[in-house]
Amino acid sequence: MRDAFLGYISVYLTYSIMGIAGYFGFNGSFFNGLPIQQNILNMFSSKDLMINILRTFLFLKIFTTYPLFFHIIREQFSRLLNHAEFDGLSSYIINGGFTLP
């Protein structure tokens, strides 16, 4: 019970800190008065090494997450259409038009 309480408190504090930082960021007071763009990474220089590393890791995160989502979709289509689990190549060919990745 104590660990769950500490977990909830730490999540609350983290979200509160990020919310306050986001409020001041959208207020424009920390970026030389410039408004925040839709993609915050575009506000930094393209020559900044740390930002480029962050962009690379963000790309890798998104690139490796999509196959997991599409696997679930493909499995559900297979169960819906075939009334069975995904069983390999034949199911992939049948359901491939719905979920190519």
Image (cartoon, rainbow, N blue to C red):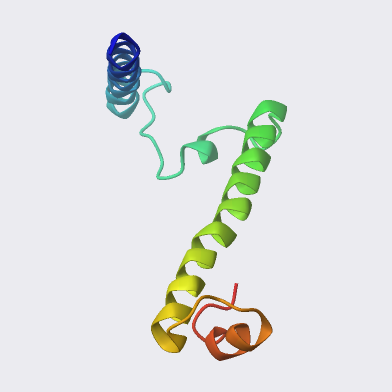
Front residue of 38 and 72: 72
Residue 57 in the figure: left or right of residue 73: right
Total count of labels: 0
Residue 72, horizontal then vertical, whole percent: 48, 65
Q: Residue at x 39, y 18 (%)?
A: 30
* Position of 41 relative to 16 (above/below): below
Front residue of 54 and 97: 97
Q: Identify the image quadrant of residue 9.
A: top left
Front residue of 28 and 96: 96
Residue 73, horizontal then vertical, whole percent: 46, 70
Q: Residue at x 29, y 23 (%)?
A: 19
* Position of 98 relative to 33 (above/below): below
Residue 38, horizontal then vertical, whole percent: 40, 45
Residue 81 in the figure: left or right of residue 16: right
- Quadrant holding the N terminus: top left
Residue 33 in the figure: left or right of residue 45: left
Residue 13, horizontal then vertical, whole percent: 30, 14
Q: Residue at x 51, y 35 (%)?
A: 43
- Quadrant holding the C terminus: bottom right
Q: Identify the image quadrant of residue 31.
A: top left
